[in-house]
Image (cartoon, rainbow, N blue to C red):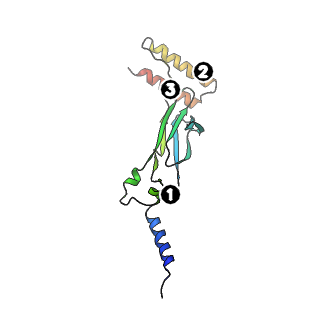
């Protein structure tokens, strides 16, 4: 009894596709990236578009470059770049398949982005460091009183201010 050739060819194709780890089929064209900040609650923009407050997860195309900007009252803005990287794929013994043919042999790096926001201290001179530190803390107190900072953010901000002025 002779088996039809087409089903065997299709079966061989499915097996080879499944065993080569084709990311287009197994991972998809988009990747979930986690964005966090210390302290949490910073407004996040990706390529200039507001996407939410930290922490959050977002699905992004694996083959594009993204700029992440974080802003929070009382803190300096922070930014980072998410880059497509083919390092995981370049380490493979066999480098062929749909990933390479479709230009999808990449992952965004880093896939978990954590940024620490620094207090917006303003100009720090060496004349009267105690007076400057007091002025910064009074500004943080005003942000707390106006509701622009939570108690936890206020505590974090004051700790960072004291730490910055404690350095020689």
Q: CA distance from mark 3 to mark 1?
A: 42 Å
Q: Quadrant of the C terminus?
A: top left
Q: Residues within 10 Å of mark 3 (few under 14, many from 20)?
A: many
Q: Of residues 50 and 138, which is closer to you in this image?
A: 50
CB contact under 8 Å: marks 1 and 2: no
CB contact under 8 Å: marks 3 and 2: no
- x 55%, y 45%: residue: 57
- x 52%, y 44%: residue: 34
Mark nearest the camera among 1 and 2 is: 1
Mark 3, residue position: 119
Q: CA distance from mark 3 to mark 2?
A: 14 Å
Identify the disc placed on residue 142.
Answer: 2
x and y, in percent, of residue 78 in the image: 50, 32
Specify which label sits upstream in the sequence, 3 or 1.
Answer: 1
Specify which label sits upstream in the sequence, 1 or 2.
Answer: 1
SS at mark 1?
helix
Q: CA distance from mark 1 to mark 2?
A: 51 Å
Mark 1, residue position: 24
Where 11 falls versus 88 (above or below)? Answer: below
Question: Residue farthest to the bottom?
Answer: 1
């Amino acid at each position: 009894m002779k088996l039809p050739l087409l089903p065997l060819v299709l079966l061989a194709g499915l097996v080879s596709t499944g065993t080569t780890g084709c990311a287009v089929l197994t991972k998809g064209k988009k990747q979930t990236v986690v964005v966090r900040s210390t302290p949490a609650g910073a407004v996040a923009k990706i390529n200039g578009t507001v996407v939410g407050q930290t922490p959050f997860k977002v699905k992004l195309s694996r083959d594009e470059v993204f700029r992440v900007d974080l802003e929070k009252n009382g803190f300096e803005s922070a930014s980072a770049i998410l880059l497509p990287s083919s390092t995981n794929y370049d380490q493979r013994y066999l480098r062929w398949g749909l990933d390479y043919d479709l230009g999808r042999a990449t992952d965004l790096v880093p896939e978990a982005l954590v940024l620490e926001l620094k207090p917006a201290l303003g100009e720090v001179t060496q004349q009267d460091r105690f007076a400057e530190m007091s002025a910064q803390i009074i500004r943080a107190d005003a942000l707390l009183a106006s509701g622009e900072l939570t108690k936890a953010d206020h505590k974090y901000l004051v700790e960072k201010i004291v730490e910055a002025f404690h350095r020689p």
